[in-house]
Image (tube, grey):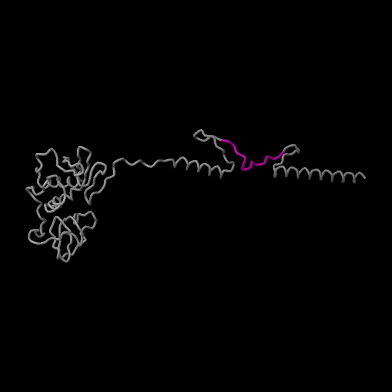
Amino acid sequence: MRSVAKIALGTALGIILAIALVAVIASVVLGSPLGGGGEVKSARSVSDTATVTDADGVGQAEAESPELSTASSRAHRRATTTKRHAPTPKPGSALTACDANIRVKAATTSCPFAQNVFLAYWMDYDSPGVFADSPGLPAYSEAVDEMFTVDCGGDPVVCEAGDGGYVTFPLSAVEVYTIADANRYAASHKTGGVDPGNNQATAPPIDGSPSSDSEECDPNYAGACLDPSSYDYDCEGGSGDGPDYTGTVRVIGDDPYDLDRDGDRIACDV
């Protein structure tokens, strides 16, 4: 009888030990506290937030998810880095074109006045000292019916009048201008008595070009007399095959020989 009791007692102890072992394993694996009095803290939901302060001292809600926190940080950086202003253009920097060469400040300068400035500059360039008795280069303004004087210099040439008039043009345009061009202009425009025919010197013809006094010249070009009956002209020193060649000329009409490749109305200038 005692043997049976011992067996029963041993079996009971074995069952108790087995139950205790299972409880220990469950505590380790599941993190459940033993003793039945504790509870497992669950992770906070996405809507649970904590308020933090950023580098600028501004309070903001921080998402509990690392992905949401990163997205919020990126949005903040975008907001702070796009607050930039486009540079403000400088007033009065834009110029108005009167023709292929002459530019003016339209607010203070008319194109007829600017063209008269160009004429006076060419006359002084062609015959230095022609306006020696004048305090500056004389230019007539039809808009106010008054003669002004301008001071010029540089390349491109910049001419300024005392009333704010501003005219600019490339020196290369002056170099290819001729007495014939000047006389044609003066014959059809009001120049206030400035007469290019009074010049004592005129620009010599370009070497190799026929004289305009001996035969008709192509009316589309100035600065050299191009034969209008020629099959083709090319620029001297270029890769063209002629049969005729010319140096720098100014295009005043069409360009039948396609000499002005850059469209600035000055042909064969490079």
Q: Is residue 184 visible?
A: yes
9 vs 163, nearest the viewer = 163
Residue 171 percent coordinates (x, y):
18, 48
Q: Is residue 270 visible?
A: no
10 vs 32, nearest the viewer = 32
Q: Reply yes or no: does residue 59 show up in magenta.
A: no
Left/right of residue 140 with respect to residue 27 in the rendered view: left
Residue 142 percent coordinates (x, y):
19, 44
Where 133 falls versus 180 (above or below)? above
- Principal SS element in the magenta part? loop
Q: Reply yes or no: does residue 40 show up in magenta.
A: yes
Q: Residue at x 18, y 42 (%)?
A: 145
Q: Residue at x 40, y 41 (%)?
A: 85
Q: Residue at x 62, y 40 (%)?
A: 48
Quarter of the image that includes the C terminus: bottom left
Residue 31 percent coordinates (x, y):
69, 42
Residue 167 percent coordinates (x, y):
21, 44
Quarter of the image that includes the N terminus: top right
Q: Residue furthest top?
A: 57
Give the quadrant of residue 235: bottom left
Give the quadrant of residue 192: top left
Magenta segment, which residues?
39-51
Q: Residue at x 16, y 43 (%)?
A: 140
Left/right of residue 10 with respect to residue 83 in the rendered view: right
